[in-house]
Image (cartoon, helix red, strand yellow):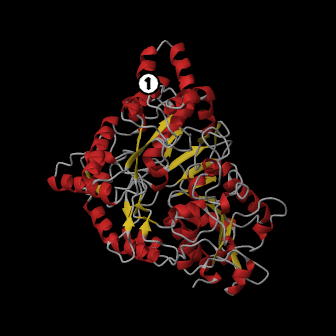
Amino acid sequence: MTQLTDWLPTTRKEMDLRGWDCADVILFSGDAYVDHPAFGAAVIGRLLESEGLRVCIVPQPDWHGDFRDFKKLGRPRLFFGISPGCMDSMVNKYTAARRLRSEDAYSPDGRHDLRPEYPTVVYTNILRKLYPDVPIVLGGIEASLRRVMHYDYWQERFRPSILCDCDADLITYGMGEKPTLELVRFLVEAINNAHHLLHYDDSGEPYVTRRLFREVATEKLCQTAFLCKKDEIPGGIKQDDIVLHSYEDCLKQPRLHAENFRHIEEESNKMHAQRLLQQMTGDRWVVVSPPYPPLTTEELDRSFDLPYTRLPHPKYKDKRIPAYEMIKFSVTLHRGCFGGCAFCTISAHQGKFIVSRSKESILREVKAITQMPDFKGYLSDLGGPSANMYRMQGKRRELCEKCKRPSCIHPAICPNLCGDHRPLLDIYRAVDKVPGIKKSFIGSGVRYDMLLHDWKQEELNRAASEYTHELITRHVSGRLKVAPEHTSDVVLSVMRKPSFRLFRQFKSIFDETCRRAGLRQQLIPYFISSHPACTDLDMADLAIQTKQMDFHLEQVQDFTPTPLTMATTCWATGYNPYTLEPIYSAKTSKQKQQQRMFFFWYRPEERRQIEYYLQSIGRQDILKKLLTHQPPYKKGDR
């Protein structure tokens, strides 16, 4: 039976129940407070709590009026932390067409009015006005991917580091456990040794000043970004620093921003990275320290083994939080992704090196789920950023330590990569033996190119084949999601995705396996329109090829430029960062709609537009292939 004190405090009353006069750290979150390892604010809060700190969370504070939500818990002893949400706030709020989404998945009952645009900036500026001398630390994907100059699709312009828009002291970028733990340890040590730099509240409680915070954080920490003047850069500009083209120069010549991006991406995916420096406006420079090495299995286990209730805070009683409903019975097996897809932010935020949980930690979480009162025996997902990368790594670590490739599997699978699916099969089988588990499904995307690859070792090829069969026959909830993304090899090369030929091969295996097992299951492919390098004729060919395979596409999306991805850099600058050659992108609403309509060739309203367009460019040959012998479309067809 849970009680209010099982959650981190969110109000003064909950602090009083714990006998706290003040908190050490107060986290402001753009999401509803769900005490679950899939919600960032809960993870950081629980981690700091395990260090003996008094941590509070203020979820979705009201940013209007008298700012009472920002004042109700008072001043923290160490710092304010801002976690704007599990998703970028603008992606969460708007579609690729800049229309308001039907619901905010991380808010109670999907409400739209509980989160501002760019909560990182809004929350920081309010706190800075109320508490001028309290340090503010930014975390989460929104700040992480805006730590240097970036393109903002919703404002339609290049922007400097987010630190130029809000007076925060530090960004901890990427997954925040390691830098946050190191930060608080350094601060606690500094408090014991720097009494002259401390301030005291009315009750005599000491708190860290911004001056002390800056001395500690900028000198010692990795995986952070901060602003300073050129003569304040710690240690000065060193020989091995990478000095990026300045913000002002990039505004004049966007090609320079493309040059910058290659350095940013490569340093984000190296085990031993270099420091990045970029001049913003005037004499303001952003300093990005190298990331910490990937977490160990033990460190990741610790994060998942913290005493979460796995439930929304009681304040949300009888309210539905859509994102929680999706993941409440799912288990994350690992972090990181070495796919390096050009349009994806996962490797930019989590890194390309896979960090896997231990089997024991995974089984502990599965057993905890079976004890939840509304659990019916079905796990919705055993996965990660990509479903089948668990425990995969380089055979020779010393080669990985020298590598700066953004992808381990594109343009070809690295010969140093060990693609052993046996540890994952072992997890699946162990989970299915847990009392109370009827079925475990795989909801995360599967990399079928790794299942079809010749690993040059019979036992690895046999394991991949065995995994494929077991996945299809035992872990599909009627529909298996995969992401070929496109059919054009030119577009797929820019996306860093495998040839569509492999999708055809996998579909044949899927269909044959289902036929032999007597299963009525669907393969659901995901596709993207308007991606850099994609033309209208590429989309017409996509429609023809998927029609020939008897698909009526459902899972499709228009490319949405998001900060700090290669695809966005191509889209915004017009150049490929790795070749510096010009690259085409569909940008206007008309251009994007002309590509998107080909997804839905089977709908009468789209058919008319396709006929008119193809006739206008004299491509009756495509028209004949696409729109003749069309089977009657019924709503619900795949």
In the image, is residue 155 above or below residue 111?
Answer: above
Residue 392, by quadrant, is bottom left
Residue placed most toward the observer, 321 or 453: 321
Residue 82 left/right relative to 65: left
Residue 284 drawn above or below residue 619: below
**Which residue occupies the extreme left position in the image?**
458
Above/below status of 528 relative to 593: below
Residue 470 percent location from the top left of the image: 28, 58
Question: Which of the 4 image quadrants contains residue 77?
Answer: bottom right
Q: Position of residue 111 (x, y in %)?
A: 69, 57
Which residue in the structure is indicated by mark 1? 626
Residue 425 is situated, as x and y percent measured from the top left of the image, at: 28, 63
Q: Which residue is depicted at the point 51% across and 78% down?
A: 307
Front one among 614 and 288: 614
User: At 36% from the left edge and 78% from the top edge, which residue is drawn?
Assistant: 435
- Visible in this render: residue 434? yes
Quadrant of the snapshot with the C terminus: top left
* Residue 173 image point, x, y percent: 54, 57
Label 1: element kind: helix
Give the quadrant of the N terminus: bottom right
Q: Residue at x 46, y 42 (%)?
A: 263
Residue nearest the observer in this picture, 606 or 89: 606
Q: What is the three-letter code of the residue carrying label 1?
A: Leu
Instruction: Residue 183: tell me if it is visible.
Output: no
In depth, the one of 355 and 266 nearer the eye is: 355
Q: Count neighbours of disc 1 (C-alpha within 10 A) and say few if under 14, some if 14 to 19, many if 20 or more.
A: many
State the residue at coordinates (79%, 64%). 130
Q: Is residue 545 left or right of residue 329?
A: left
